[in-house]
Amino acid sequence: MSNPLKTDPNIDQLAESAIKNAKALITESAPNLKLNDRASRKRFTRLFKDPDAVSVTVTLTDEVMRIKSSKHAAKLLAGAAKQASFAGFGFVNAVGLKMIGILGSVAPKPVLFAVDTQVKRLSKGIILPSEKKKLGRQIKRRSKNAIRLNINVLGEAVLGQREADERFERVLEMMHRPEVDYVSVKLSSVAAQIIALDRKGTAKRVSAKLQQIYRVSQSTGTFVNLDMEEFRDLRLTVDAFKEVLTMPEFSNLYAGIVLQAY
């Protein structure tokens, strides 16, 4: 099937090169994988091939584990558990999800605690701990192999002002750590009330947050890479990036941005 969209040949070559490099990295790292790494890779491969499994996972991480009300979280869990397929989760995990989905209506708190514990256990190999000592050890270990880490404080779009403020403070605290020299930040994860119909007000709010982040970047030397959660954040993020960096106080600041083009 031909591609209906016109693309830049130079960018096409970069995309092909990126795919080639990614395959080479996977192939080269395969012999060094431990048994649990192989099991984890197999589990994620199976999950990503099943759209329903991806949907269930997103519901668990972005909704069930973030809602304060145990009753509402258990209700969401029950709905997500019904969609858990053997193809995406495997027999044991799929059956387990369906069972806890049923039990959640009877004993929501212990069930939700079990879900939270299991999700953290399964993601342990791909998500670094944020605790200062633990993360510091991980960064130091990788720096010995000439590996530089881009630290992304976990979390997507925030649910309200309080969560936005908490995430924002976590990002600033991370930037102040001496071992951290590179962070990624999504404006949608540190600023609440991103409203499409209020472009001017939204731009003002995210610009104020970004200025604070860049001031910390200047004082600590931590490089900041602006990221975005989805395509709808593209224009807002680019506008804020350009607006703030044209301010005199940031004329010598070195900063980056990732463009979400899909």
Image: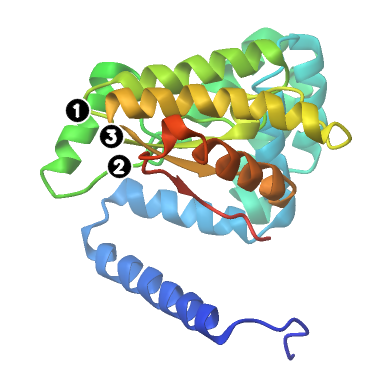
Q: Nearer the viewer, residue 41 or 155?
A: 155
| Location of the C terminus (image quadrant) | bottom right
- Which image quadrant for residue 138? top left
* Circle 3 residue: 181
What amino acid is found at the position of numbered circle 3 in the picture? Asp
The residue at the point 75 percent across, 35 percent down is: 81
Q: Are marks 2 and 3 in contact (CB under 8 Å)?
A: no
Question: N-terminal of the two: label 2 or label 3?
Answer: 2
Q: Nearer the viewer, residue 207 or 55?
A: 207
Circle 1 or circle 3, nearest the eye: 3
The residue at the point 41 percent across, 39 percent down is: 251
Crowding at dot 1, Cα within 10 Å, few <14 / some 14-19 / many 20+, comes out as few
Q: Find residue 5 and report its horizontal and vertical position in percent.
A: 75, 81
What amino acid is found at the position of numbered circle 1 in the picture? Arg
* Circle 2 residue: 149
Would residue 224 be found to the left or right of residue 5 on screen? left
In three-dimensional space, the C-alpha distance between marks 2 and 1, rounded to whole angstroms, equals 12 Å
- Determine the secondary structure under disc 2: loop
Q: Is residue 61 visible?
A: no
Crowding at dot 2, Cα within 10 Å, few <14 / some 14-19 / many 20+, comes out as some
- Determine the secondary structure under disc 1: helix
In three-dimensional space, the C-alpha distance between marks 1 and 3, rounded to whole angstroms, equals 15 Å
- Which image quadrant for residue 71? top right
Q: Find residue 60 and report its horizontal and vertical position in percent.
A: 67, 31
Residue 137, disc: 1
Question: N-terminal of the two: label 2 or label 1?
Answer: 1
